[in-house]
Amino acid sequence: MDEILLILKKKKNVSKAKITAGFFKTKKGEYGEGDIFWGIDVPFLREIEKKYFLQIDFLEIEFFLNQKIHELRFLGVIFLVKKYQKEKNEKQKEKIVNFYLKNISHINNWDLVDVSAPKILGDYFFSQDKKILYQLVKSKNLWERRIAILATLGFIRKNSFADTLKMAQILLLDREDLIQKAVGWMLREVGKKDQKILEEFLKKNKNQMARTTLRYAIEKFSLEKRKKYLEKK
C-alpha cells in the first residue's frame, strides 16, 4: 500500500486536478463539495489496480475508501469490484456486498457509483431479495439513490426490467439532475433491449417526467420520434 501511495503522489498533476475538481462540481453547495483531486487519469489508476490487485486485502481497500482524495477512493472501489468479479464463492460474494454497503458513505460521487453499483450490487441482488435496494432508492442521500437505480443496470443486462421501471417510477419527481440523468440512462438501456416496454412506460409517465430524464430515455429513438415525444412534453 505504501508503494502505491508513493507512486500516486509522484503522479499528482496540479493543473489537471483543478480542471477535474471543476468537472466534478467540488465548490461549496455543489454535489461534490469538499472532494479533493490529485489530477490522476483513470487509465493510470486502472494500471495500478491490475498490477497490485493480488496484493491488496480488505483492510487496505477500506483505507483507500476512507480517504478524502477522490482518486484513492476510486482505486479502492475498482479493487473491490475486481475482488467481487474474481470471487466464485457465494458466501464470499455476500461478504463483499456487505463490505460495500458498510462503506457506502464513501461511494460519494457519480463515477464511484457508476463503476461499482451495477457490477457488485447489480450482479448480487439479481437473484436475491432486493429490499435493500428499495430502501436505498428512497434515501435522502443523492448517492444512495443513484446507487440503487444504477444497480438495476445489472438486471437489465440479464433482460430483467421490472425493478428498473419500479425505481424509475419512485424517482420520477426527483429534482436532482444526477438522478434525472441516471433514470433516463437506465430507461434508455431498457429501450435498447425492448423499445416497446420503454414506450409503454413513457406513454404513462412522460408528463410527470423531468425533461432531462425524457431526453436521456429517448436518445436512441429516431429523430422524428424524439421530436414527437419532446413536443408533447
Image: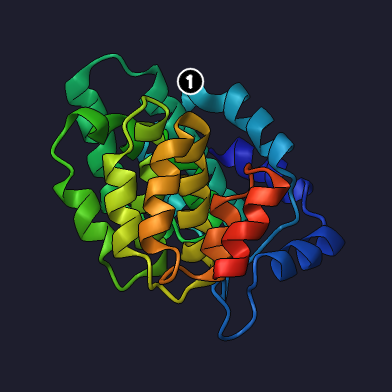
Locate the C terminus by quadrant: bottom right
Amino acid at pointer 1: Leu
Compared with 51, 179 (above or below) is: below
> Residue at the location (62% across, 36% down)?
3
Please give left or right for residue 232 compared with residue 95 in the image: right
Answer left or right for 16 relative to 140. right
Residue 130 horizontal side relative to residue 36, left or right: left
x and y, in percent, of residue 197 in the image: 39, 40
Instruction: Determine the residue positioned at 65% across, 72% down.
Output: 25
Q: Secondary structure at mark 1?
A: helix
Residue 28, visible in the rendered structure: yes
For image coordinates 65% across by 65% down, the residue present is 24
Q: How many marks?
A: 1
- Residue under label 1, please give it: 54
Residue 203 position in % (x across, y down): 41, 56
Query: Taking 10 as reference, is 70 left or right?
Result: left
Above/below status of 24 relative to 113: below
